[in-house]
Image: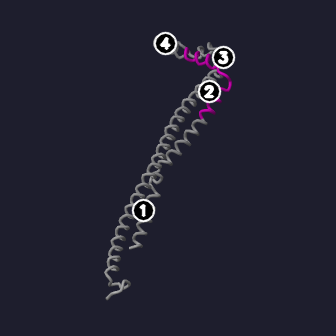
């Protein structure tokens, strides 16, 4: 007769077979749980990467808008500077600008064009007289600051769009680690 502690005893044989079945079931259940956890990690990390992508696009848009605004402000500074230059060249009297252009020997169309230019110069001189002294310099400074901030936003946004920053690194590392651990267990 066999004793209950004997490996050939029917009760021990059933326990061993149930144990193997239970182990296989545990392996499948743990493997399934592991895959679900990896999927959750990948979803969370991809959501985080999508948020980073949105922030990068926002920075690119803001930087572009600031650069465009700075261009307008810098052009305003240029206009102010040219107006000041015209005042320096022709003085405060718009008639002095008219005297610079000789109308002798010109046909009617050319005289009309010169008259239009004189009117534009006169308007620029009038505008230059009404400008505060430091308006052009202030516009230049504001334009430069806007351009710097816009360029920094663009650079930062572009660096966030680097493909290396959009890869789900944690998920990849965890899957590799789990794969190595599974190979070691087998």
Q: Indicate which label's residue lies in the foreground, 3 or 4.
A: 3
Q: Indicate which label's residue lies in the foreground, 3 or 2.
A: 2
Q: How is the image coloured?
A: one colour
Mark 3, residues whose alpha carbon is within 10 Å: few (<14), some, or many (≥20)?
some
N-term-proximal mark, 3 vs 1: 3
Q: Position of residue 55 (x, y in %)?
A: 50, 43
The residue identified by callout 1 is 175
Disc 1/disc 2 C-alpha distance (Å): 63 Å
Q: What main secondary structure does the magenta stretch of the protein show?
A: helix
Displayed quadrant of residue 78: top right
Q: Which of the pair 9/99 is nearer the observer?
A: 9
The residue identified by callout 3 is 92
Disc 3 on helix, strand or loop?
loop
Disc 2 on helix, strand or loop?
helix
Disc 1/disc 4 C-alpha distance (Å): 80 Å
Q: Are marks 2 and 4 in contact (CB under 8 Å)?
A: no
Above or below: residue 68 compared with residue 10: above
Quadrant where the image shows the C terminus:
bottom left
Q: Which portion, as a residue range, is magenta?
A: 118-143
Q: Position of residue 174 (x, y in %)?
A: 45, 62
Q: Tell me: 87 left or right of 29.
A: right
Identified at 34% across, 70% down, the residue is 24
N-term-proximal mark, 3 vs 4: 3
Mark 2, residues whose alpha carbon is within 10 Å: few (<14), some, or many (≥20)?
some
Q: Tell me: 93 left or right of 65.
A: right
The residue identified by callout 4 is 112
The residue identified by callout 2 is 81
């Amino acid at each position: 007769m066999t004793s209950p502690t004997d490996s050939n005893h029917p009760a021990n044989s059933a326990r061993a077979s149930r144990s193997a079945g239970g182990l296989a079931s545990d392996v499948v259940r743990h493997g399934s749980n592991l895959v679900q956890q990896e999927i959750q990690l990948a979803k969370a990390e991809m959501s985080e990467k999508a948020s980073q992508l949105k922030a990068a696009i926002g920075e690119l848009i803001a930087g572009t808008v600031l650069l465009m605004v700075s261009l307008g402000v810098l052009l305003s500074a240029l206009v102010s500077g040219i107006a000041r230059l015209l005042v320096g060249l022709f003085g405060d009297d718009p008639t002095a600008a008219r005297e610079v252009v000789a109308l002798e020997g010109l046909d009617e169309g050319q005289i009309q064009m010169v008259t239009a230019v004189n009117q534009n110069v006169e308007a620029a001189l009038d505008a230059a007289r009404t400008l505060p002294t430091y308006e052009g310099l202030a516009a230049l400074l504001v334009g430069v600051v806007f351009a710097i901030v816009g360029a920094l936003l663009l650079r930062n946004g572009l660096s966030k769009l680097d493909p290396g920053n959009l890869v789900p690194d944690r998920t990849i590392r965890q899957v590799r680690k789990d794969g190595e651990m599974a190979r070691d267990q087998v």
